[in-house]
Image (tube, grey):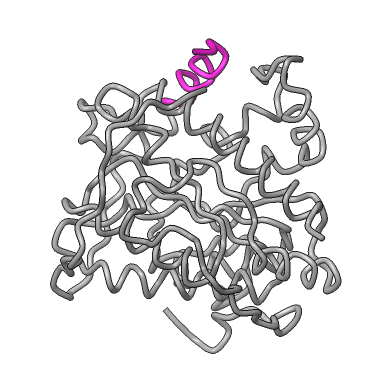
């Protein structure tokens, strides 16, 4: 394990301490229990609300159906999906139309709670503590290309943010956002990112509806695609809902939209206690968990960016 990641994570514990008191978000709807239980293998890892809620789209995306036969793995086996995704045909289409419409080339942003702040989510790659060595020139190139984004403070990242509050103007930073503008809409308008990581799901409760969560997630993805940005969904190491239904819901959205999904759940499976801190309700990651998450996120950014640019 690279000590640089662990040092950086220890520095960030003050931010995570503030995050610990954030209330989980639940809905009034009953829990939805999927009919197909997820496959949860043991693996070895090598390595609200107004008309201005929706931003003005940069373009109207043209949807191309996934070619047949469709050989993609089904959502019900999400636990065995690849850890690091590539961009499919739909993502390439969004990328090209977005660049033509004016998104910022070689930029990425995030939607999430305090665990998506730069201090703990990839910000280390924009500092002199960057732990990637000369033996990975491909990753060093990706870091250089996206250098301006690693320490960008997204208007859609906030302590306690959940899928519904990401769409709620009451949660927006009113020093940066317009009146009645949601955190997601605000970030898309201000930064116009080429790629957006969606890191949600931890601020939820057992018994809250997974179907409701999926509905909110689809609205977020719709906003991002309408902006011309490529969404990257990420699943989570925790199981706050008790039945892994939020990771299944995330896989359903990724599958239906044919967009990349970073399988962090599988990457964390090699770690003690799945990379979770048992002293902090098994919600927050250990230093080893941050190490793996940052490494996998950088590799995902590298993979998606290269497959977008090299697509025929």
Q: Is residue 161 magenta?
A: no
| Residue appearing at x 41%, y 25% in the figure | 13
- Which percent across, then down, holds residue 267? 42, 34
| Residue appearing at x 15%, y 68% in the figure | 31
- Which percent across, then down, holds residue 189? 70, 68
Q: Which range of residues does the magenta coloring cover?
A: 1-13
Farthest residue to the front: give it: 69
> Does residue 53 sit above or below 123 in this rendering?
below
Is residue 111 in view from this perspective? no
Q: Is 96 situated left or right of 131 in this image?
A: right
- Which percent across, then down, holds residue 277? 27, 27
> Does residue 144 sit above or below 100 in this rendering?
above
> Does residue 238 sit above or below 74 in this rendering?
above
- Which percent across, then down, holds residue 183? 54, 65
* Res 146 quadrant in image: top right
Is residue 30 in view from this perspective? yes
Identify which residue, 97 or 161, lies in the foreground: 97
Q: Is residue 8 magenta?
A: yes
Q: Point out the image quarter for the C terminus.
A: bottom right
| Residue appearing at x 67%, y 56% in the figure | 195
Q: Is 50 situated left or right of 187 in this image?
A: left
Farthest residue to the bottom: give it: 51
């Amino acid at each position: 394990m690279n000590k640089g990641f662990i040092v950086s994570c220890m520095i960030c514990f003050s931010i995570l301490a503030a995050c610990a008191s954030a209330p989980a978000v639940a809905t009034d709807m009953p829990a939805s229990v999927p009919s197909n239980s997820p496959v949860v293998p043991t693996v070895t890892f090598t390595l609200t609300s107004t008309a201005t809620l929706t931003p003005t789209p940069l373009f109207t995306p043209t949807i191309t159906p996934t070619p047949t036969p469709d050989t993609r793995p089904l959502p019900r086996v999400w636990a065995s999906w690849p850890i690091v995704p590539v961009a499919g045909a739909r993502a390439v289409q969004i990328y090209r139309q977005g660049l033509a419409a004016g998104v910022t080339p070689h930029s990425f942003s995030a939607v999430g709670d305090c665990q998506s702040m730069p201090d703990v989510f990839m910000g280390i790659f924009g500092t002199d503590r960057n732990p990637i060595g000369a033996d990975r020139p491909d990753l060093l190139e990706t870091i250089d290309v996206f250098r301006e984004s690693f320490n960008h403070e997204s208007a859609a990242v906030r302590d306690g943010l959940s899928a519904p509050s990401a769409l709620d103007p009451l949660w927006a930073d009113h020093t940066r956002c317009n009146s009645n503008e949601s955190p997601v809409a605000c970030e898309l308008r201000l930064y116009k990112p080429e790629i957006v990581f969606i890191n949600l799901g931890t601020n939820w409760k057992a018994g809250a509806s997974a179907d409701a969560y999926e509905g909110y997630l689809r609205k977020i993805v719709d906003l991002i695609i309408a902006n011309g940005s490529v969404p990257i969904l990420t699943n989570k190491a925790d199981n706050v809902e008790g039945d892994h239904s939020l990771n299944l819901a995330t896989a359903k959205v990724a599958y239906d939209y044919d967009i990349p999904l970073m399988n962090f759940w599988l990457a964390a499976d090699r770690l003690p206690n799945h990379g979770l801190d048992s002293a902090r309700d098994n919600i927050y990651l250990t230093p080893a968990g941050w190490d793996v998450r940052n490494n996998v996120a950088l590799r995902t950014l590298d993979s998606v960016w290269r497959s977008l640019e090299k697509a025929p």
